[in-house]
Image: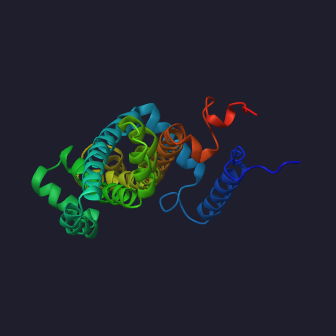
Amino acid sequence: MNPTPPSQHPQQQSPSLWPAFAGLGSFLVLWQLGAMGYSTVVLPSPVETWMALQRLAIAGKLTHALLITSFHLFSAFAIAVLLGVIAGIGAGIWPGLRWGISPLISALQGIPPIGWIVLALLWFGSGHGTPIFTITAAVLPIVFLGTVEGMQRFPLPLAEMAQIYRAPDRLLLVDLYFPHLLSYLFPALTAGLGLAWRVAVMAELLSSETGIGAELNLARINLETDEVMAWIAIAVFSIWICEYLLLRPLRRWLEPWQHGDTPKNSHRDRPSSR
């Protein structure tokens, strides 16, 4: 029996969902046990939170708030990714530009989101501008640093070999530069998206009259703790949906080799000439 060559990896099996369901079930049980010792105002039960979520959906508040927050988040996230990738590629190519931008990125990282919210309120007032600006300022350094790291860790011997064999520019871009950069960029995008949701809710809570954060603040003022928990649950599920139904499928499609998927026309599938 011939051993499998080191360059060939078996198809990776999909991870089981049972551990995730077990962890979620354990959390719900602990939540229910904690709610049994307190009143609804302090800690509503999962059932009461679910009923509040149904009321919000029937009243139309859920859809409207999700649309507003999604607009703030994805607009700002797109701006941050565009600026971060462009600046990161430039900083990776030209060291002088990297040394010039690095202090600015460090300053952006050092300012907490609440500081950006206060500044944005002074500059843009209450409205769409404050959450969009705050999310952009918070996510931009993460995307920039991930792009710079990918550029710095690029395997130079591969690039030199490609130049020796005069590989076409399209081949270099599609099969060499782009896949390598994605392997560093996707972890940054995942971390940035989670941060973007948290900052979006915080910015809307302090500056907006619409959105998940604004509705969360209104429920807090009215001491409707079940609705507060419902809005928190909506934010958490929105993060999960963006990661597991958006980023991970996109990464699997763009990086099939990371999951053991190889194109059907790959050279590995070709019959041997022997």
Farthest residue, direction right:
1
Q: Position of residue 144 (x, y in %)?
A: 31, 56
Q: Is residue 122 visible in the rendered structure shown here?
A: yes
Viewer-nearest residue: 124 or 208: 124
From the viewer's side, name the closer residue of 28 and 94: 94
Q: Position of residue 154 (x, y in %)?
A: 41, 57
Q: Quadrant of residue 203?
A: bottom left
Q: Position of residue 153 (x, y in %)?
A: 41, 61
State the residue at coordinates (25%, 69%). 106
On the picture, is 263 further left or further right than 67?
Answer: right
How many dots with numbers? 0
Image height of 132 relative to 56, above or below: below
Can residue 189 be seen? no
* Residue for point 32% across, 43% down: 211
Residue that protrudes farthest toward the left in the picture? 123
Residue 192 image offset from top left, x and y in percent? 38, 54
Rendering colour mode: rainbow
Q: Is residue 151 left or right of residue 268?
A: left
The quadrant the C terminus occupies is top right
User: Where is 35 relative to 60, above or below?
Assistant: below
Quarter assignment of residue 206: bottom left
Q: Residue 91 or 241: which is nearer the viewer?
A: 91
